[in-house]
Amino acid sequence: MANVSASIQRELYQIEIKSPSGNVLIADEPVANGGKDTGFSPTELLASALAACTSATLRMYADRKGWELEEVQVAINLEYNSSENKTVINRSIQFIGNLDDAQRSRLLAVANACPVHKILSNPIEINTSI
């Protein structure tokens, strides 16, 4: 389970996001949308969650297997098409290290099983209260 809280005050579109453990993150809108671009946009945060989860999941798996994975590079492109009411997320993963084809194939399967990938790939229900 994840819990965060967010608040916005008078500074246009600058949002302070906090976790129960005390971590703080600033989100903002780009200048083109009226913000000051002082932090990730909400859409960038969503893409970042997938990139971070993919990276961490792959690192944990490779370490547990003792594989020679030196680095994982993940790039996410998230686009919302309003005319089709559809979101497309393209994820590119690079594995740097001494890995054979079977290991690379297994790492791809592991990436597709990261928790955020599973969340985004399944139905999502959002319940809001005031």
Image (cartoon, grey):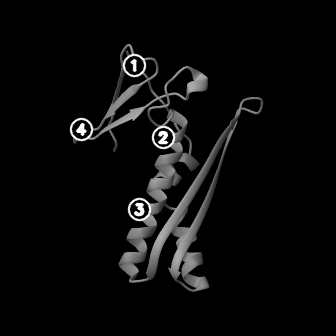
Question: Which is in the foreground here, disc 1 or disc 3?
Answer: 3
Q: Disc 1 designates what residue?
A: 129
Q: Position of residue 50 (x, y in %)?
A: 50, 51
Q: Gap between marks 1 and 4, in whole Å? A: 20 Å
Q: Disc 2 designates what residue?
A: 45
* Proximity of marks 1 and 4: CB atoms separated by less than 8 Å: no
Q: Amino acid at mark 1?
A: Ser
Question: Which is in the foreground here, disc 4 or disc 2?
Answer: 2
**Residue at 40% in and 81% down:** 65
Q: Amino acid at mark 3?
A: Ala
Q: Gap between marks 2 and 1, in whole Å? A: 23 Å
Q: Disc 3 designates what residue?
A: 56
Residue 46 drawn above or below residue 61: above
Q: Amino acid at mark 4?
A: Pro
Residue 24 drawn above or below residue 128: below
**Residue at 54% in and 46% down:** 120
Q: Earlier in the sequence, mark 1 or mark 4?
A: 4
Q: Amino acid at mark 2?
A: Leu
Between 1 and 73, the one nearer to me in the picture: 73
Mark 2 lies on a secondary structure that is helix
Q: Position of residue 123 (x, y in %)?
A: 56, 42
Mark 4 lies on a secondary structure that is loop
Q: Position of residue 118 (x, y in %)?
A: 51, 53
Q: Dot 3 surroundings within 10 Å: few (below 14), some, or many (20 or more)?
A: some
Q: Which quarter of the figure is the N terminus placed in?
A: top left
65 to the left or right of 51 = left
22 to the left or right of 39 = left
Residue 62 drawn above or below residue 98: above
Q: Gap between marks 1 and 3, in whole Å? A: 33 Å
Q: Gap between marks 4 and 2, in whole Å? A: 18 Å
